[in-house]
Amino acid sequence: MKYFISLLSIILLGIGQVHAYGKYPIIPYPKALQAMEGYFIFQSNMQLSIPSKDKEVHQIATDFINRLSKVSGLQLTIAQDNIYADIVFTQDKSLGKEAYLLNISPEKIIVKAASPVGFFYAVQSILQLLPAEICSPDFIGNQVVWQIPCAHIADEPSFGYRGMMLDVARYFMPKQYVLEFIDRLAAQKINYFHFHLTEDQGWRIEIKKYPRLTSVGAYRPYTQTGYKHFHAPVIPDGVEHQGFYTQEDIKEIVAYAEQRYITIIPEIELPGHSSAAVAAYPELSCGIKKEYEVVKNFGIFDNVFCPKETTFQFLNDVFTEVAELFPGKYIHIGGDECPKAAWKQCKHCQQLIKNLKLKGESGLQSYFIHRVEKILNAKGKQLIGWDEILEGGLAPNSTVMSWRGEQGGIKAAQAGHPVIMIPNADTYLNYYQEDPEFAPVGSGSFLPMEQIYRFNPLSTLLKGNLSQYVLGTEAALWTPYMKTPQVVDYYMYPRFYAFAEVAWGTNKPERYQEFLTNLNPHYKRLDYQSVHACRNYFDAYIDGTFNRRTQSFEIRLKGMMPGSEIHYTLNGNEPTIKDATYTQPIKITRDTHIKAAIFNNGKQVGKVTQKSFFVNKATGKKTSSNVAYRFKPDNPGAKDYSEFNFCGLTNGIRGYLNHVHPWVAFKPARYTEIVVDLDTLTSFKEIRYGVMNGYGQEAVAPKSVDIEISNDSISFKRIVSKKFTYTIENKWQMFEQKFNFESQKARYVKLRFKNGKLPHNLGDFPVPKEREGEPGLLFIDEIEIK
C-alpha cells in the first residue's frame, strides 16, 4: 500500500500528465496516470507471467490472450513467476483488494495487484488502451498495430458498491443479452448487477414450488400502446409478451457474472408491484377484487400482498429457492410504491393493525418488511430496499437504496444504516437523454450526461462522519418503454460511461471535457459490439431561455464532441459547413425555427437537430395563479404542487404530445385564474395558448375562458369570453386557442378558465373512482401575447 500511495502522490503532482486524455481513453479514468513516451507493441511469442498456483489469475490471463489472439492472430504464452517475461503479473499484498498498478514501457508491462479482481481490472484498462478493433467479432490481423501507450497507472475505486440495475420484469430480456450486459458492466469495472426480476407486468424467475408464478405470472396477452396514460382506456398493442429464466439459466448467469467479479442482487418486489404474483396465486391478496391479472399497462397498482401467515410462508418458500441460486449476501425486496387501498379495506389487515398497535397502514408496511427481513436473515442474507422501507420504522439490519432524492439515504445514515445512493434525477438512465420532443418514448425527465457526470454520491448534506454509511451508488434502467435490447442500449449509452466514472470516484466537474475526449473512441468499440447507442454525442443540443438581465431571448447550442463546430440556420434550411458557426448565444426577437448540426474536419458527423421558439410580449414575464401548478408535471422528484412566479407558461416553448415535459399542470379546481404581468403598459391584439386533453393524465380541456385586462391588477376589464366544444378521442390531444381583437393596452392579462370534468366509466382508466366527475387538471403549454 505504501508503494501505491507513493506512486499516486507522484502522479497527482502532475508529472507527465500533459495530453493524458484522449491518448488514454480508459473509462472510468484511473485515480492517477503518468503519461510516458513510447508504446508497448504486442507480438507473437511474447510471454505473460503470472503468480504460480493461482487459478483465477491464470484464467484472467488466458481470457486476455485468447481475446487478443482471436482478433490479431498473435500467439502469446503463459509462464509462471518469470520476472523476465514481456508481461508480468505480480502479487502485491500491500495493495487494496480492487487496486492495481500498471507500469507500461516499450519493453515490458508490469501489473501489480493484491487479488484476482485487481488483475482483472488492470486487464480491462489494458483492453481499453488497445485499438478499438480489439472489440471486433471478426479477425483483424495486421490491419492495425496492436500497441498501447506507455504510462504509470495507480488505480483503485472510491466506492465498494458500484451497481447497475436492469428491469427485466416489465419487458423480458433474453438470457444472451443479459450475459452481454454483464460483459459491458465488467468492462467499466461495475461490481454489482441488480437484477429486477418481478413486477406487476411479469414474474421472470422459475420457482419450482410455485409453478404458476411463471406459467401465469410470466405472460400477458398484450401491452399498452404509447406513453403511460396516453390512451384511456388502454389500447392494446396486440402482441403477446412472455418469458422467464429457468433455474438453470439463473445458475449460468450467476456463474458468468462471478467470473467477471460481479455479484448479482436479485430483486423480488413486495409488498407492492406484485400483480403478477397475485394473479398466479390470488390467495396472496386481500381478496378485494373478484379476479387478479398480470397488469398490461404501467403505473402503480393496488394488487399488493396481504400480510397473512400464508403470504409469509409463500415468501419464505420463494426466498429459500432464490437464496440458493444467488450466493451474494444481498436480496432486494423492493418495498417501494405500495398503495394502501387494499389494506384499508381488508378486515384482516385492520385487525392486525389493531392487535399489534401499529401506526396505520404505514406501520403495517414496516411490519411486513420486518417479517421479510427475519426470513432473509435466517437464510444468511441481508435485505436491501428502496427508501420507502423507511416508512413506519426501518428494519434493524436493512440497507437503503435512496431513489427519491438524497433525503432517504441521509435519514438512513443518521440511523446508522448502510446506504446506496441512487437519486432518480441523477442516475435513472431510462430518463430522456435527447430532446423529448423528438426522442423515442421514454419515462421521467430529461437527464443529460453532464448532469450524471457531476453527481457526487457523498452528498454535501451528509454531516460529520455520516458519509461512512454510503456504500456507493447505482444507476437504473427501468424498461416500461424498452421492448427490445436495442432500446435498452439506446438509453444506456453513452451515459453509462459517465456513471461508471462516478461510481469509480474519478469524475471531477473540471474534467468533463477531457471525459468527452476519452469517450469518442468508445463509439467505435460499441459499433464493433453491435451496441445500438444513442448518437447524441455527435449532435447539437438546442436550448433557449429568456435572459431577464438583458431582457432578451437567447438560444444556446451545445455539442459533446470536442474539436468540432456547430453550424446552424434560422431560415428553415438544412445547415451546411457554409452556414453560420455558433460561437455565442443567439439573440432572437421573433418566432424562430433553428436547425443545427455538428461538423468535424469539414464534414457533418451527426443528424440535424431542430427546435422552434416563440418570442412575444409575454415571453419571460412573470405569471401567478389562484391555484398551485407544476412545471414538468410528471417529474418523479416533484411530489407536490408548488407555486412560483416564473415557469413554463412564458418560456418560449410550446407543448407537444409525445410527452408532458413542456406543459404546466394546474391542480384540480372549479376555476383556474392565471395572470401575466407584462411589467409595463403594453399594446397587443392577439392572445394564444394551447391546452391538452388526456384523461389518462387527468388532463381535461377547459369548458370556457374569460380574458380580462388591467393596469393595476385590481380593476379588470373583460375583452374575451368564449365557450368551447371538442371532439374527444382516446389519446392525448392538443387544442390551440387563439383570439384576435382590437388593439388593447394594459400591464396585466388575466385568463379565467372554467375547468372541464373527468368522465365516468373508462374501464382501466387509472384515475381513482372518487375523481370521476370531478374537475380535471388544466394543462397549458405557452401563453403568447402579440
Image (spheres, helix red, strand yellow):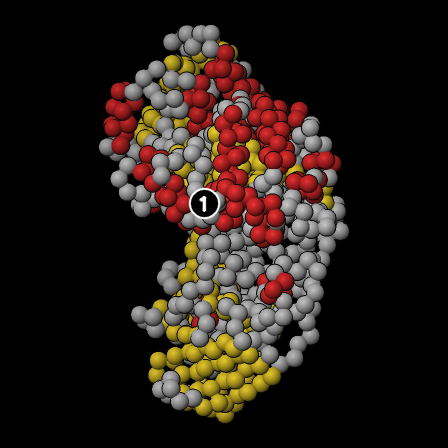
Nearer to me, 301 or 657:
301
Asked which secondary structure carries label 1, the reply is: loop
Q: Nearer the viewer, residue 117 or 305?
A: 305
Residue found 69% across the figure and 42% down from its top: 282
- Quadrant hosting residue 773: bottom right
Q: Is residue 689 left or right of residue 1?
A: right
Q: Amino acid at mark 1?
A: Gly
List the single residue furthest toward the front. Answer: 355
User: Residue 138: horizontal and vertical position, in percent?
Assistant: 61, 28
Tell me if I can see residue 782 in this picture.
Answer: yes
Residue at 45% x, 82% y: name it. 750
Q: Quadrant of residue 217?
A: top right
**Side of 338 relative to 519 (left or right):** right
Q: Is residue 389 above or below residue 91?
A: below
Can you identify the residue that label 1 sits on?
392
Q: Determine whether 669 is above or below 156 in the image.
A: below
Expressed as whole percent of the image width and height from the top left, the position of residue 411 reads 37, 44
Q: Position of residue 25 (x, y in %)?
A: 42, 35
Give the residue drawn at x 32%, y 30%.
32
Q: Residue furthest bottom?
A: 742
Task: Work out whether 312 lies above or below 226.
Answer: above
137 horizontally vs 163: left or right: right
Location of residue 183 in the rendering, given as x and y in whole percent from the top left corner? 54, 30
Label 1, residues with CA under 10 Å away: few <14, some 14-19, many ≥20:
some
Q: Is any atom of residue 262 visible in this view? A: no
The residue sitting at 28% across, 37% down in the picture is 465
